[in-house]
Amino acid sequence: MRVSRRMSHRSSWVRRAVLAIAMAMLAPLGLAAVHAAPTANAAFNPSGFDFWANDANGVPLKSRIFRAADGNTARVVYALDGLRARTDLNGWEIETDIANALTRANINVVMPVGGECSFYSDWEAPSEFGFGSSSGSSQKFPYRMETFITRDLPNALAARLGFSQTRNGIFGLSMGGSAALTLAAYHPNQFSYAGSFSGYLNISAPGMKEAMRLAFLDQNGYNIDAMWGPPWDPNWLRNDPFVFAPRLRDEGIRLYIASGSGIPGMHDQPRSFVDLYNTGNAMGLEAIALANTRAFQVRLASLGYNNVTYDYPPVGTHSWPWWADNVYRMLPDLSAHIG
């Protein structure tokens, strides 16, 4: 009985640990973002406008466009959201003021709206089961986000606004950070620059697939098998930055790779129990992102790839003010490598 209790306790601890990782993946774009918003009026930027384009399913999708201060159409960057991407506004607009900084640097900003849990991928099938949520967990059509961002949306932007479809930049946080590298690796004719902030760049690492599955289920019941198939499907490897890193090297994509330490700093000042809980989740999540990012750095070094800037501040959790700081530090490098 003593052995059985020990084994049962260990099994229970493992389950709790995996669930904690999964919950941490959700926290920054939901609960943890509550205390991270820098200002209450950051949720809508009147300098932007709605831009609609149909995806490969014929479904109209919204993006938010912010025009470069000098009116050019050659310098374009795409800003990708995280796991809990909303359908009204992109998280970068809701939680930060980066659009104003980028447009002042004469960069046009494209913020795709929506794509909750999508990893900005073309899914293999619709997610056909859910918890009755109206947010899309029981889908009529599979996501076609990769095709949308690399074909449908840039074609529409070129036709209606004259935006360049070459030497664009792309960056994102968490889910969007991983996706930014994927889209740049497979579409180098469009993207010359990619930035990842707190991204999951080694998703084949032990425990990552299981954590992602639980996170998707918790986020309105998405079936992750609909995305890249079951865990043994080659599509998982196709979308793992650690695996496809040689493509980034061979295509000469300029990279900006960042992750915080998980140690709270000036942006982390919990004032309530909920804030404290969110900060704890953001700390744990950033520690996982840091481990993924450091592994990816070693991978690039083993490939002899040095066309990259690494940004590892000594403090920083998985929350919006830290990601905004990443953009401000990245901006001169981004500006020099697009357009």
Image (cartoon, rainbow, N blue to C red):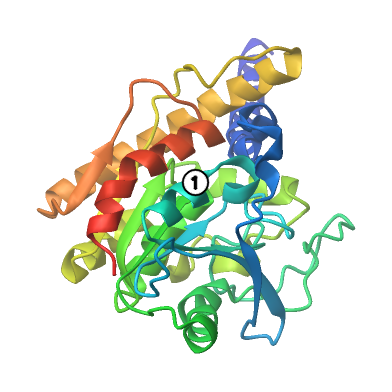
Q: Residue furthest front?
A: 70
Q: Position of residue 123 (x, y in %)?
A: 59, 73
Can residue 78 be seen in this snapshot? yes
Q: Residue at x 22, y 45 (%)?
A: 309
Can residue 203 be seen in this snapshot? no
Q: How many marks?
A: 1
Task: Name the quadrant containing residue 294.
Answer: top left
Q: Position of residue 330 (x, y in %)?
A: 32, 45
Q: Residue at x 40, y 21 (%)?
A: 315
Q: Residue at x 36, y 54 (%)?
A: 105
Q: Which residue is mark 1?
A: 98
Q: Is residue 292 above or below residue 266?
A: below
From the viewer's perspective, is 173 left or right of 144? left
> Which sits in the foreground, 185 or 311?
311
Crowdedness of circle 1 by 10 Å Cα count: few (<14), some, many (20+)?
Answer: some
Location of the N terminus (image quadrant): top right
Q: Is residue 323 above or below residue 121?
A: above
From the viewer's perspective, is 106 left or right of 4? left
Q: Position of residue 269 (x, y in %)?
A: 59, 14
Q: Tag 1: residue type?
A: Ile
Q: Position of residue 258 (x, y in %)?
A: 34, 40
Location of the C terminus (image quadrant): bottom left
> Which sits in the foreground, 145 or 221?
145
Q: Secondary structure at mark 1?
A: helix
Q: Is residue 12 above or below residue 48?
A: above
> Which sits in the foreground, 46 or 12?
46
Q: Residue furthest right?
A: 132
